[in-house]
Image (cartoon, rainbow, N blue to C red):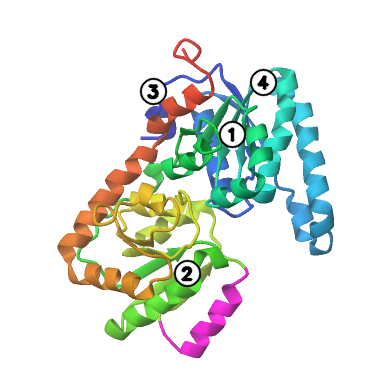
Amino acid sequence: MDVHEASSRDWRHVRVAILGPFPPRPGGVSVQCAILSDALESSGAQVTRINTDIPWLRIRRDMRRWMFPTAQVAHLIRNLRTTRDEWDILHVHGASWWGFMPAVVGLTARRWGKRLVITYHGGQAAAFMARYGGLARATLMRYHALLTLTATQAAIFKQYGLSPTVVPNVVPIERFHFRPRGPIEPRILWLRHFEPRYRPEDALAVFSRIHERHASATLTFVGGGSLQERLKEQVRQMNVPGVRFAGPQPFATLPAIYDAADVFLNTSAIDNLPLTLIEASASGLPIVSTDAGAIPDLIRDGENGLLAPVGDVEALTSHILTLLNSADLARRLSLAARSNAMRFEWRQVAPLLAQAYGLDDASLA
């Protein structure tokens, strides 16, 4: 069933602008902006994409630091003004720190009588609000709807007198081939950015322990980032076979990558609602993850995945070994993972989004 068939509503009279990063910029937010735009268009809505990224400027490292902030603000204001007759709803996708800038710029649309909706991404909301709570609250109060991806994140904003609504990410479940696992082979997949907050070195430490017990074990790293070369050097020094660096991959190639694995390993220290965990669940992969941030809102330990404290390499290793030794557990978690992923289908999220957009059944008829 495709996105259009899955939607129970007709969005033909809806005109919305999605303001956020779009591919080829890497990251879950850019992927989500693209997926959401596609889902809305497939249901009949008119969508205007306003990209917060300026790819050509990011390539120029000599200019990026001092020129990018000013250029990005000017870029967004210009695009909002030139497209304002094309949309009635502005849906901003923001985050913490400089990622909050689109929320501020988006207020420009209030003077044109537009409805303002913002989805807050990322796992650093608590730290950001603790430092800039006054400014952030004043900005978010002027939005008609504040959306968060998880209840854990919503609780943070409630502490500041805001009224968030939980509307999760949309995931095109139908694109991921579901293959029930159990028994499983030690084919491990790690898919995130090679950045400190995602602790890729922990994944390598886990794998080295798994490899001691299972010589045929493999670990596939997918992604790019500042720690990639250092991690490759560690692999060379450790001389552990079976480690593959697949590099960053476009969304279209991901279903096959998930399908080739038997265990999904996530080692992040800061997180909210990672698309990778939903995609892995849709593929039927048993998940072993840290309990960072709002991950327990998505993965329930022992029910649809196995969780361990951040940085606890031994616990993560033990979970994978348990899965390798218990076909029944692996299969139960695999089936539960797929069921868990189904709640992120467009037909499940669409009614929540329609309410945030201020739409009723009559306006969507």
Q: Which residue is mark 2?
A: 221
Nearer the observer, disc 4 or disc 3? 4
Q: Residue at x 33, y 64 (%)?
A: 263
Amino acid type of the residue that numbered disc 4 sits on in the rendered structure: Lys
Q: Quadrant of the N terminus?
A: top left
Q: Which residue is mark 1?
A: 118
Q: Residue at x 65, y 49 (%)?
A: 131
The magenta stretch is 226-241
Q: Secondary structure at mark 4?
A: loop
For marks 2 and 4, give the CA distance. 43 Å
For marks 1 and 3, give the CA distance. 23 Å
Q: Which residue is mark 3?
A: 8
Classify 10 Å Cα crowding around label 1: few (below 14), some (14-19), many (20 and above): many
- Identify which residue, 280 or 289, lies in the foreground: 289
For marks 2 and 3, give the CA distance. 38 Å
Q: Which residue is mark 4?
A: 114
Q: Secondary structure at mark 1?
A: strand
